[in-house]
Amino acid sequence: MITALPDVKTLDLEQSDDFMVIACDGIWNSMTSQQVVDFVGHRINKTDKLSSVCDENMSGAQHSRRWHRM
C-alpha cells in the first residue's frame, strides 16, 4: 500500500545520541529498530563512508525479506 501520509515523529536529540536513522518501510518491515541500531552502530565506527553503511543495511534488509518469503 502506498500512502501520501507518512508516519512522523518529533524527537529531541540528546548529546548522547550517536546517529539517527531515517528509513523507508522496506527497512522497518524486515528489521526491528534495535536490529537497525545494532547494525549501524557496529559499522559506523569502522568506515568513513556512511553510504557504505546504508548500502550494507539495504542489502541486509533485502536478504532478510527474501529469507522470510521462503
Image (cartoon, rainbow, N blue to C red):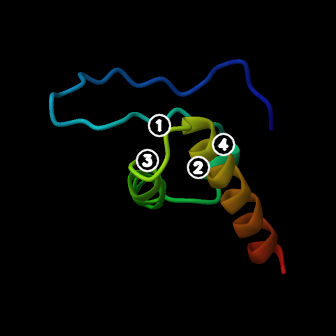
Q: CA distance from mark 1 to mark 2?
A: 11 Å
Q: In the shown orientation, is residue 26 left or right of residue 9?
A: right
Contact (CB < 8 A) between labels 4 and 2? yes
User: What type is the residue that disc 1 sits on?
Assistant: Val
Q: Position of residue 25 (x, y in %)?
A: 66, 42
Q: Would you name the residue on which mark 4 appears?
A: 25
Mark 1, residue position: 21
Q: Nearer the viewer, residue 67 or 51?
A: 51
Residue carrying label 3: 44
Reading the image, the residue beneath label 2 is: 28
Q: Mark 2 or mark 1, which is nearer the start of the sequence?
A: 1
2 vs 3, front mark: 3
What residue is rendered at 68% in x and 46% in y?
A: 55
Say which quarter of the image contains residue 70: bottom right
- Sequence order check: which comes first, mark 3 or mark 4? 4
* Residue at image coords 77%, 76%: 67
* Quarter of the rendering containing residue 54: top right
Residue occupying the point 54% across, 28% down = 7
CB atoms of marks 1 and 4 within 8 Å: no
**Nearest to viewer (mark 3 / mark 1):** 3
